[in-house]
Amino acid sequence: QGCPVSIDDTLPCVPLPSSDLSAMFARGSALGRRFASSAAAASVSRSGDGARLGTAAVAAGAAATAAWSLQQQQRERAARCDSDPVALGTALLGGLAVGGAGGYLLGKSKKDAVEAKYETYWPRKIMMVFGAPGAGKGTQGVKIVDELEIPQLSTGDMLREAVAAGTEIGKKAKEVMAAGALVSDEIVIGIIADRIKEPDCKTGFILDGFPRTLPQAKALDEMLAKNGESVSLVMAFDVDQAVLEDRVCGRWMDKASGRSYHVKYAPPKSMKMGPDGKPIPSTMKDDITGNALYQRPDDTAEALKKRLDSYNNSTVPILDHYAPKGIVKHIDGGRNIHTVWSDVKSKLASGN
């Protein structure tokens, strides 16, 4: 039988044991995978880098396998017989394939992890969340923030931050507040315009508590249009008034921590009911600290009615304003929290 070309054609033909072939395959694979893993960990950009990492790993796998094979030949100084060329080729190509495939998969998985949310929610998500008191928008808002990894911007917080930072618009707001006047829509829009330039708003943001009136919504639209942007999604949580009253009027709060309890759905362990079927106030205490709980002044049936009237008069026109654009999505907030979130999540991704 003839021999393949070796480093030294004068050396005798020595058969390669199958155990050596297995070792060669393993070593070649390991070297290829190790290089691919290092390359993948370096950096993965949004587009194309996963494929480039895979290509680099293929080349690296080939180089690593060939180099080791050459070193092995030099060390043993023996030729390989023609009886083993198929097995030898299989071992070398096996290491190459595993190294290359490993690099591609490592690069692709990292790229996919980075791009997944952008592919689903791109372009920049500019959201508004509306809901009457007790509709659950606060609870779902936290989940939306976690899902999209974008900030929820409160006008009150932004106003205080701008004043504390001493920005130009913050100074104007400070003067107005010091005079005991209401901050104008123009100033609020200016504060929002500054805030959404921050890095954490790069992929989107949720407006909380703004706009409250139709003129504010139109002013916001004009500001966003200057950058070629617009509101992309408006979520409205709809809940029957009787359900809202049940939720709101049964709510008790711990002032220090902000923990919320409910007479019906999440009562404190200390709660005792009176002869009238209502909780005895002195027994309403925080489960952790034992501090006395309290009810907010506007968590009453009378106050709720006024708040609902105000909400409907100011918010419904805003929803009507955005409805023709097809971006208003209604959520039945009267269902259990998990069902509501499932509906919210599907509408975040599909917009349906």
Image (cartoon, rainbow, N blue to C red):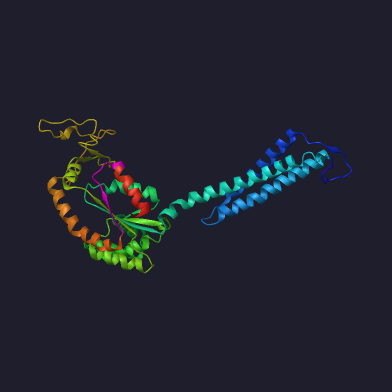
In the rendered image, residue 63, in percent from the top left (x then y), is placed at 71, 49
Which of these two is toward me, 258 or 54? 54
Q: Residue furthest right?
A: 10
Which of these two is toward me, 288 or 208? 208
Left or right of 170 on screen, residue 42: right
Q: Quadrant of the C terminus?
A: bottom left
Q: Quadrant of the N terminus?
A: top right
Which of these two is toward me, 194 or 122? 122
Please report the residue visible at 28 percent of the width from the left and 67 percent of the height from the top.
219
In the rendered image, residue 282, in percent from the top left (x then y), is placed at 17, 33
Q: Is residue 273 above or below residue 134?
A: above
Quadrant of the image occupied by residue 325: bottom left
Extent of the magenta region: 327-338
Q: Is residue 339 above or below residue 219?
A: above
In the rendered image, residue 307, in percent from the top left (x then y), is placed at 17, 52
Quadrant of the image occupied by residue 48: bottom right
Left or right of 112 on screen, residue 257: left
Please report the residue visible at 52 percent of the width from the left and 47 percent of the height from the top.
109
Please state the total of marks drawn on the protein image: 0
In the rendered image, residue 189, in percent from the top left (x then y), is placed at 31, 64
Q: Say whether residue 37 is visible.
A: no
Q: Residue furthest front?
A: 1
Please report the residue visible at 23 percent of the width from the left and 45 percent of the height from the top.
334
Left or right of 50 on screen, residue 258: left
Q: Say whether residue 241 is visible.
A: yes
Is residue 334 covered in magenta?
yes
Is residue 116 covered in magenta?
no
Quadrant of the image occupied by residue 276: top left
